[in-house]
Amino acid sequence: MKHRRYKNPVGVSKYTGLLLISPFITGFLIFTLYPFVCSFVIGMTDQHSMVVSKFVGFTNYRTILSSDDFRNAMGVTLKYAAILVPLKLAVSLFTAVLLNLEIRGIGFFRTSFYIPSILGANLSVAVMWQYLFTSNGLVNQFLELLGLSPVSWYGDPDAALYIIILLRLWEFGSTMIIFLAALRDIPRDIHDAAKVDGCGCIRSFFIITLPQIKGVIFVNLILQTISALQEFNAPYIITGGGPLKSTYTLGMLIYDEMFKYGETGYANAVSWILFAIIVSAVGLMYLITGRKERGKK
């Protein structure tokens, strides 16, 4: 039997697809891959601002790892992520479960709960949050109405960090939307069958809902961990890293070394250490999840 040769019915060149994605490839090479490689190279030099530098190898990395500022910033960043991420996932999932109920006006509530995530990136919201916790701010005024003593939120190292955590916790809308989409994809017949068998709401949540959305939980865990480890805006605007550098994150350390002190090589080296921390955290999560899946098999 003679083999027929395929002919393009519309006369489109085989390079058309490559041409269509060429803007993305060009943008990726110029604005992502090139800066990525340059950052690693600069991190191996003693470059200061735009002054010509010389290659120093891993000297910057040894200096960073022995620096008290770096150890403090890494500790603050890890503590911040360890507290914020589980809280944000729990609040987002709980809210998504409530918003998954079919009640009158549920669309209004879904929109209302999502709005803080849109406003969270706004500078004015961060400034407003800053003034809420000043000595004469709304929070202390409310405490005085309850007969409680005002709290020095920005004078207490522990309290200052929780102000940042509370702001980011308030912005749970994006995570909630992902959970809500996953919940709505669960067939309702499964819950109806469980209800007929006498399964209560709480038990149904743990034996049906959670197993069905475990993949989405993992995705949100990864996304929120990466975001928390890169935190910069909130502590920079609200507390400036204080008091006593209790809110001084790795993102702020990179910013100060780069733009305040002009230590370009040092700052790029810190950014690569932060990158290694993020990759290690994500890799550890994948490893733990993979072990659990293999154990079930």
Image (cartoon, rainbow, N blue to C red):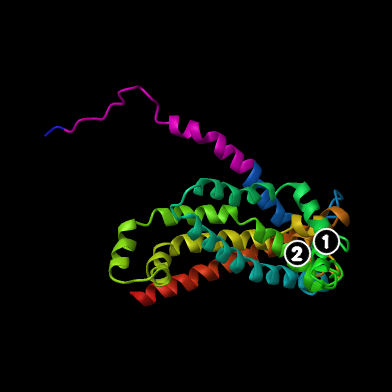
Q: Is residue 106 above or below residue 189?
A: above
Q: Residue at x 85, y 70 (%)?
A: 150
Q: Residue 206 in the image: x percent, y percent?
A: 42, 71
Q: Which residue, given by chain and number where applicable, does mark 1 sit on? A: 239
Q: Is residue 120 inside the magenta stretch?
A: no
Q: Which residue, given by chain and number where applicable, does mark 2 sit on? A: 163
Residue type, label 2: Ile
Q: Residue at x 48, y 60 (%)?
A: 97
> Do the numbered discs 2 and 1 sit on residues whose CB atoms are within 8 Å?
yes
Residue type, label 1: Thr
Q: Residue 2 in the image: x percent, y percent?
A: 14, 32
Relative placement, left or right, of 242 versus 251 is: right
The N terminus sits in image quarter? top left
Q: Secondary structure at mark 1?
A: loop
Residue nearest the observer in this picture, 193 or 164: 193
Relative placement, left or right, of 133 versus 220 is: right
